Image: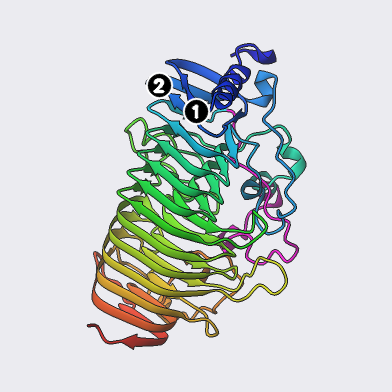
């Protein structure tokens, strides 16, 4: 583990994987100890196992005399950011692989990875960044979104899988995972189970995948989303993300590293987008393809933003069930449903749609007063058929009376976040442009008085509870 390449395990690990693959498959075991590496190439039929006490550390190009595999050319990189458009610039990557696994109980430490990467090259750039970032200086924005040239030799993902079939990542700990702890794009039959992730940006990004199980994962991501489903154009076509179950998971926004050490720090107040810490479960923002048959159940959110379902790039989101969720210390809106009109995609990209959403048995407490649970469609694409059943929301209260008079614009092209509209004109539920809202039990309370109305429905057609 010294400069000049001495101590690097990269070649030995890759040779062992290639040998196992050539024999028709097998297991490569990293034993107890610290193993320093640049890019590891996973091949079909191979299981990479990190034993108890093993730490696979991402090497630092500026220190260890090497580089990560180059970000491969992608002719379809116009519509999503650099991180979503490349896979090989990672600590571990696999492309067009089958029957692979990365297993714990060891740990990945992404010490040498970067969390940064350029944004998309989309010329219109509407809705590229949250409105909360509008006041940041050019210097800060350049640091958060560097030039492509600055990424040469760097790795910005712990694990990346592209078009993998029958893949498992289980019982592994990931610390400091770069832009993505795990990026899975175009994968089928994917299992992510019993992962412990405490990372400096995104946790699990599942993009254009089908038949996915995320179960028993603990995710701490103060700077970005913990578990997020996307449907981008990174593979050159709109591919639906469908038949995904997220269950028995915990997401949070504690200080980096403090979930792993058990101190659960609360020093960091804001994420890089200048809203409060993140750590949530989200569908979107990339939404060129569809989202279908998604189940989110028995999950806990702590010191994080709430559940967010977002369609802004032309896809359709339908048949989503979220049930038995518990939230504490909610840092923005506990529920945020949004159809927008960013349309980051090729000419002719349609307006997106959202329909048949069921949210039930959800409890949220300690919610900041600024943002109510929000369901915000557009006049030309209302959100349709939303059921809220047995929802209990407890806000801190203390909102300003003047907020009740606010009537924000629809802001169709803005990046979707609850803060995009400013403080909500209601303190509990604010819905606009909804065709078919069924409420079957909604309890709203405030710890301190709040002068705003409890609910505000604008251009909403309610349906009778059964």
Residue at mark 2: 51
**N-terminal label among 1 and 2:** 2
Q: Is residue 257 magenta?
A: no
Residue 362 visible (yes or no): yes
Q: Is residue 135 magenta?
A: yes
Residue 277 visible (yes or no): no
Q: Is residue 293 above or below residue 210?
A: below
> Mark 1 packing: few (<14 Cα in 10 Å), some, or many (20+)?
many
Residue 371: % across, % down: 40, 67
Residue at mark 1: 109
Q: Nearer the viewer, residue 390 or 91?
A: 91
> How far separated are the C-alphas under marks 1 and 2?
14 Å
Q: Is residue 375 left or right of residue 136?
A: left
The stretch of residues the image draws in magenta is 112-141
Q: Nearer the viewer, residue 301 or 185?
A: 185
Quadrant (top left/top right/bottom left/bottom right) for the C terminus: bottom left
Residue 105: % across, % down: 37, 27
> Mark 2 packing: few (<14 Cα in 10 Å), some, or many (20+)?
some
Foreground disc of the pair 1, 2: 2
């Amino acid at each position: 583990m010294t400069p000049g390449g001495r101590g690097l395990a990269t070649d030995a690990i890759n040779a062992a994987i290639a040998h196992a693959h050539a024999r028709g498959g097998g297991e490569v075991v990293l034993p107890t100890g610290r193993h320093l590496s640049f890019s590891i190439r996973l091949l079909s039929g191979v299981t990479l196992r990190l034993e108890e006490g093993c730490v696979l550390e991402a090497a630092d190009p500026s220190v260890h005399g090497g580089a990560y595999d180059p970000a491969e050319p992608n002719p379809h990189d116009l519509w999503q950011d650099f991180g979503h458009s490349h896979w090989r610039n990672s600590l571990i990557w696999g492309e067009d692989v089958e029957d692979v696994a990365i297993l714990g109980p060891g740990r990945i430490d992404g010490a040498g990875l970067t969390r940064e990467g350029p944004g998309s090259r989309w010329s219109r750039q509407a809705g590229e960044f949250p409105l909360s970032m509008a006041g940041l200086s050019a210097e800060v924005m350049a640091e958060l979104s560097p030039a492509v040239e600055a990424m040469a030799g760097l790795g910005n993902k712990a694990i990346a899988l592209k078009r993998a079939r029958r893949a498992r990542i289980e019982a592994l700990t990931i610390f400091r995972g770069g832009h993505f702890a795990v990026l899975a794009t175009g994968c089928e039959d994917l299992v992510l189970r019993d992962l412990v992730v405490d990372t400096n940006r995104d946790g699990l990004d599942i993009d254009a995948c089908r038949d996915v199980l995320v179960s028993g994962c603990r995710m701490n991501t103060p700077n970005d989303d913990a578990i997020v489903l996307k449907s981008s154009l990174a593979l050159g076509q709109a591919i639906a993300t469908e038949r995904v179950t997220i269950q028995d998971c915990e997401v949070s926004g504690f200080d980096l590293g403090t979930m792993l050490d058990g101190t659960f720090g609360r020093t960091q107040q804001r994420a890089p987008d200048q809203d409060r810490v993140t750590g949530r479960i989200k569908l979107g923002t990339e939404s060129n393809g569809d989202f279908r048959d998604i189940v989110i159940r028995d999950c806990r959110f702590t010191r994080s933003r709430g559940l967010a379902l977002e369609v802004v790039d032309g896809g359709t989101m339908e048949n989503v069930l979220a049930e038995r969720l518990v939230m504490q210390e909610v840092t923005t809106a506990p529920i945020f449903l949004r159809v927008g009109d960013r349309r980051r995609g090729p000419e002719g990209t349609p307006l997106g749609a959202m329909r048949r959403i069921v949210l039930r048995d959800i409890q949220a407490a300690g919610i900041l007063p600024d943002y109510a649970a929000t369901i915000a469609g557009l006049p030309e694409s209302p959100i349709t058929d939303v059921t809220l059943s047995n929802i209990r929301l407890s806000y801190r209260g203390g909102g300003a009376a003047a907020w009740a008079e606010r009537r924000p614009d629809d802001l169709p092209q803005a990046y979707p976040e609850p803060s995009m509209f400013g403080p909500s004109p209601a303190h509990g539920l604010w819905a606009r442009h909804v065709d078919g809202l069924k409420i079957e039990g909604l309890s709203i309370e405030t710890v301190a008085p709040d002068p705003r109305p409890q609910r505000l429905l604008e251009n909403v057609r309610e349906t009778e509870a059964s």
